[in-house]
Image: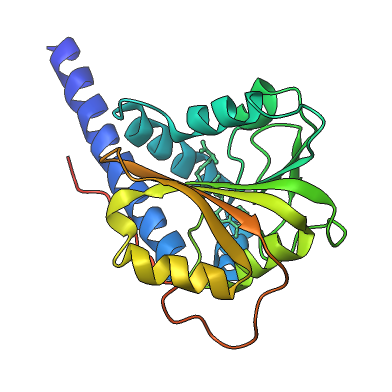
Amino acid sequence: RSGRSAALRARMEERLLGARFRYLNQQLYTGSSRDAAQLFRADPAAFHLYHRGFEQQVRRWPERPVQRIVRYLRRRPASLVVADFGCGDCTLAASVRNKVHCFDLVPLSPRVTVCDMAEVPLADESVDVAVFCLALMGTNLQEILGEANRVLKLGGTLMVAEVASRFEDTGAFMKAMAQLGFRTVSKDLSSSYFYLLEFAKTGPARPGRAPGLRLRPCLYKRR
Ligand code: SAH
């Protein structure tokens, strides 16, 4: 009997965690990056819970997007300096020889510099590769990608891995990216889970709003 009630209790806890993860996740995708920063600053425990939920989701996928970015970087010179926006547990930094600046809201690893990705402590044109791996969460996408543009050298690479179902209109998204100073180098839309997009910085963003720059929130279903 005690075995059965322990199992029941574990199942209920799992459910509760799932519900809290989905709620936090929804907040991250429907608010600005600043709201996210404030949320986790006020409640670091929420961040750890979010990450457990995130891990559980991604474990179901056939491949972790970050592994694709690792493979990409290993094919390029290790001398390239990388900025990982929303680095999570720093899998990327731990898997390559490059110098990687890791940014996130709460440090899951001592490598992390805690900051809002819309405002990273890097000099203008100081990095060769900027990475957003499942990390374009805030509603202020234009500001966030503007920050990546600022820190990237001319001709530098922007890698974006994002959940496929978030894209409403990939063509409009690419056009908006051009306005933000990013030329499309390659796009891999073959995975049904995530898209992998590679851009090169052509120059600073052109002024004005880029209306095509829209991604749906990534809301996980209850399981
Ligand atoms: N890139 C990692 C983690 C992806 S989860 C991987 O692929 O495994 C998304 C990460 O973005 C989370 O760690 C979350 O805390 C971070 N994040 C979300 N909003 C952020 C913000 N405004 N500033 C910095 N990091 C943010």
76 lies above or below 192: above
Q: Quadrant of residue 60?
A: top left
Image-based side of 145 in relation to 121, left or right: left
Measured as percent of width and height from the top left, residue 104 is found at: 65, 48
Q: Position of residue 115 (x, y in %)?
A: 72, 56
Which of the two residues, 90 or 8, is positioned nearer the viewer here? 90
Q: Position of residue 75 (x, y in %)?
A: 63, 25
Q: Residue at x 30, y 67 (%)?
A: 169
> What residue lies at 61% left-to-right and 41% top-to-bottom?
87
Is 161 rendered above or below residue 65?
below
The quarter of the picture where the C terminus appears is top left
Task: Judge left or right: residue 134 versus residue 60.
Answer: right
Q: Quadrant of the N terminus?
A: top left
The answer to whether residue 7 is above or below residue 47 is above
Rendering quarter of residue 155: bottom right
Give left or right: position of 20 versus 180.
Answer: left
Identify which residue, 70 or 53, lies in the foreground. Answer: 70
Q: Identify the residue shown where x is 38% and y is 72%.
A: 172
Whether residue 31 can be seen here: no
